[in-house]
Image: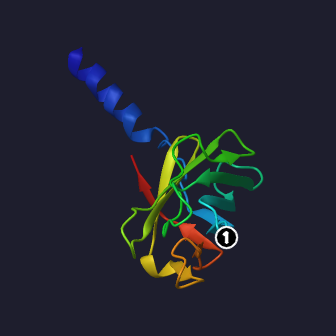
Amino acid sequence: MKSFSSVLLLAGLATASPVARQTTGPYDITNFSASKVHLSGYCNFAFDVSAPGLSVPSHCTAYLDSGFSGATWLANVYEGAGKCDNAAVSWTFFQPTTAGSGATFNVTVNGVKGRYAVPAEDITVSLNSEPNPFDNDVAYTGPKAFEITEFVE
């Protein structure tokens, strides 16, 4: 009887429908901007994200202090500091304070985190006044639209 039950179980498994995997991405980022406010330590971030699981694009923003007005980096955006108009979306942005460094931009949609490595050459630092080292501008100057295709646990 055990053999007959095992055969029936295996036959049932062989004919079962496969479970569909949820599509993760890519996440389409548009209208991306990030810059330090002139003569200030504050940074503005803004972008829109479209992704599987979102019925309409979500708009995200942040306005945060980078530490001081002479900063040559963009502010770090920690989890919860950046706001989106859809509660299913959150994001972070981390740039080391080392001169000429790139950044890591993470977008999480419905619990799935996507990661985008921002190349150092896409973040521009401009010194406006040689005698005043605090008079500089920092801005993301890379593409305004890109895809996030790397997903992490």
- In front of the other: 112 or 94: 94
| Residue that extends furthest to the front in the rendered view of this protein | 131
- In front of the other: 96 or 119: 96
- In front of the other: 147 or 21: 147
Left or right of 83? Residue 22 is left
Residue in view at x 58 percent, y 83 percent: 129
Residue in view at x 73 percent, y 52 percent: 58
Residue 65 appears at what percent x and percent y? 58, 52
In the displayed structure, 23 sits above or below 1; it is: below
Q: Specify the amino acid type for callout 1.
A: His
Q: Is residue 129 visible?
A: yes
Q: Find numbered disc 1 in the image and state the secondary structure of the residue it sits on.
A: loop
- Give the image quarter of residue 38: bottom right
Residue 13 appears at what percent x and percent y? 38, 35
Q: Is residue 21 visible?
A: no
In the displayed structure, 9 sits above or below 1; it is: below
In the displayed structure, 126 sits above or below 46; it is: below
- In front of the other: 153 or 73: 73
In the displayed structure, 101 sits above or below 22; it is: below
Quadrant of the image for the N terminus? Answer: top left
Type of colouring: rainbow
Label 1, on which residue?
38
Residue in view at x 62 percent, y 47 percent: 82
Residue 112 appears at what percent x and percent y? 51, 46
- Give the image quarter of residue 132: bottom right
Q: Label 1 crowding class (10 Å Cα cut-off): few <14, some 14-19, many 20+?
A: some
Residue 104 appears at what percent x and percent y? 45, 61
Label count reads 1
